[in-house]
Image (spheres, grey):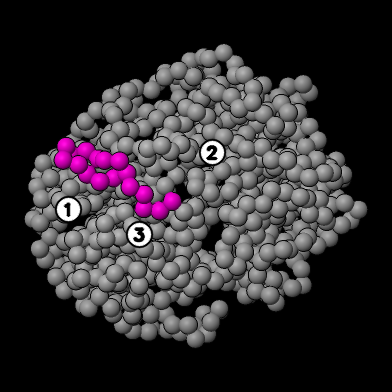
Amino acid sequence: MPYHPRIIAALLALALTLAGCTGETPPPPTASSSAVNAPALPPDQFPPLPDRADAAEITVHDLASDGTTLVMVADVDGRRTLPLLRWSADAGATWTDWQLTDDAARATTVDEAASGVAAVAISGERRTWLALGTAGDDVIAWTSADAKTWNRTPVTGLDSDADHVESVSGLTGGGFVAVGQSWTVGVTRPSIWLSADGVGWTRAKAPEAEGYLQQVAARGDRLVAVGGHDLAERRNGRSGESLLFTSRDRGENWRAVTVPEPADSGKFYSSLGAVTATPSGFVVGGSYFDQSEGTYRPLLLRSDDLTAWRRLPKLAEPYQSSGVGSLMSLGSTLIAAQYASTADDVGKAWVQRLEAGRWTTVSHPVAEASTSLWTASVANDTAVLAVQTETRPSSSALWRLGATGAITEVRVTPPESAGKAISPSGLMLVDGRVAGYGTAQGAEVWWPGNDQGGFDTPRVVVDRADDSIDYLAWSARGGFLATGSHADEHALTLHSADGTNWTRSRSDAFNATGQYHSGEINDLTWAHDQWVVVGEKSTNGDVRTSALAYTSTNGVRWTEGSPTKVTARGDWYDRNAPLDDLHGLENRGRIMNGVLAMPRGLVAVGETRSARYQRPAAWVSGNNDYWRLIRLDSPGYPAAALWSVVRVGDALVASGWARAAKAKRSVRAMWRSTDGGRSWTFHAFEGGEEGSLLAASENEFIWVVRSDDLHTFTIYRSPDGLTWTAQPLAVEGWSEGVLVGLDDALVDGNQLHLMLTLVNRLTASTVVQTVPL
């Protein structure tokens, strides 16, 4: 799905070969633990918070077990996001970091990332461990015979653009089966792949359907895969359906099974996301929408013959909107890990054990912050679940339990080599000096500029676990305004007159905080003695999206913008709900991505959404209050949207993306207006949508584009948005083997300031390079 933020950060995931240990002595160092393939970087210009821990985070994405050894696939978020594999011989009580062979370390590229799936194939005494990842446009496989030392091999048969693997299972006797989805323009279909070695993959023929597969489990020659299909257009009152596929011949042939639903479901929505093999068959789990109570309930089914599926005893539901996240079988004991969301959007996780036909809740650690389930496996007669708690920084743990007794918790800690978690993301002018903002060691911060052209010690904007900041701006009359979200769901702002003391908006300032409600701010500006923010919000999850447009004189209390005209009323959810310039209905959404102050009023750009496509759109407001929607064209490109808009004189230029029919990738696109945003002309450019950024000085448009080599740039300049001249830009401090991400651009008089992040295989450095105009 195309990205829509105002600033497109092309920060690349890196490959990591870490030596280290949590609980055990690591093997002797090899080339994989040295700085091989990791050229030097220029010094980082953004200092850390003093007297504060590094605050690197680790997220466990998958666990795989052969019954004795357990392998973890994780991401480490320190100075960069890096993949990490670990192995354990004691059911997750202690862990040792992976080692790459020397050849694998030398072959590792800068842009490698873990796909978050792992499995093991067993053939007699032989083990083949597998984890999948990506390296630029390629898919790679990490394989190992002992879970300790790993090879790295490019994969064949998987398309990194169209195919996405969600789950892999090893097969008895050797080989693997993978499930996920494949995407073409407007259509996602469930996909199944088979491999003898985890490197070469062939596509199996899946039953004809749309949607995705999320997990697969195997027992002998029998396999079960589960997933769902979110219907783009409601069918007989249904908005989503479960997918359940079964195979009796090691994945060569599959059949679809109709999933029975409880009587109170109303046949409105269900999905499956968990499956486990038991001694007698399979159990699958997910959730369905209980129409009588207006919330989600667990869905749990069992089968011994892959044909007849029956419901298991009802699970306890202490919270609303609960479902089954993971299933495990400890001999004859079934264990279900559940997730839920409370009325105030706090995530909860807990575990139940099926004993004598009844579910009993297992005693587990309780956290005040949101807790999420990630994955689970079984080793040495112990069920192991990975959970993450949204503290600041977030904390990961493993819950370990047997067929009886309570849960014991093991903290998952990142390697010391992860470095300080510092991530600058944007630039702004404060009293004539270039300043930066981003995150430092778990806190949202901004870096004041100094007289030497560098940056001073950061100041904290917010250090609350469930609040995050996306953008920060300053105005001499309006002070500082930070925009972000609360609990990743509800838009918020923080205002400060001095950059030190901050006042937070109410959590419901931009939308009610009820169930399925959300809001997101995509851009902000100071215009006509008011702060203006634009974005998107919803009263029903992804179903009904409306444009968010608000103004404020103090950055704390906000007034919602108004539509100019109502064009229709009513959808399945509310027969009287309006469809107008700002408010969307089902499959008729509106999203504002960028906003610009005009000499009189405002112009915003973004997109409308139908069941299949995103379409380009703009809005004009003559008084900062009433908005009029203008639908734009993109001839030859059925899908398109706008990110941002800038002005030089009477000309407006908006940047965005466009995608041709049947194309796998989007291209860069621009729209131009000379009548205040009321009409626009369209032009598409070669090159992917990422790695470009549009800005403007008083007398020219400036378009910064990163080259396909991912380390050189071209600056295009135009006085009118029609004719452009190209100026190559070499990145200072670059050396062979280093990639460069474009984070932000800021025009200050006759200077262009570029925030760039240079990355090698192990770490990163963020700098600001100034270009004379």
Q: Nearer the viewer, residue 93 or 123?
A: 93
Question: How far across and down, in percent of the image, does residue 476 sit?
Answer: 18, 61
Question: How far across and down, in percent of the image, does residue 265 sit?
Answer: 71, 71
Three-letter code, disc 2: Ile
- Give the magenta-colored segment's residue range: 447-463
Work out whether mark 1 precedes mark 2 in sequence or the reverse, and give the earlier one.
2
Whether residue 24 is situated above or below residue 285 in the rendered picture: above
Work out whether mark 1 precedes mark 3 in sequence or the reverse, and give the earlier one.
1
Decide whether the magenta segment is chiefly helix, strand or loop.
loop
CA–CA distance between discs 1 and 2? 38 Å
Please state which of the two labelled residues, at mark 3 or mark 2, is closer to the viewer.
3
- Judge from the rendering whether residue 155 lies leftward or rightward of residue 606; answer left or right: right
Whether residue 66 is situated above or below residue 682 in the rendered picture: above
- Judge from the rendering whether residue 245 lies leftward or rightward of residue 643; answer left or right: right
Whether residue 724 is situated above or below residue 732 in the rendered picture: below
Three-letter code, disc 3: Trp
Residue 7 appears in the picture as rendered: yes
Mark 3 Cα within 10 Å, few/some/many (few <14, many 20+)?
A: some
The residue wearing badge 1 is 431
Magenta stretch holds residue 451: yes
Q: Secondary structure at mark 3?
A: loop
Residue depicted at 46% across the width and 36% down the height: 53
Most distant residue in the bottom direction: 576
Most distant residue in the right direction: 356
The residue wearing badge 3 is 502
The residue wearing badge 2 is 58
Please state which of the two labelled residues, at mark 1 or mark 3, is closer to the viewer.
3
Question: How far across and down, in percent of the image, does residue 314 sit?
Answer: 80, 62
Assess whether mark 3 and mark 1 are in contact (beta carbons under 8 angstroms). Answer: no
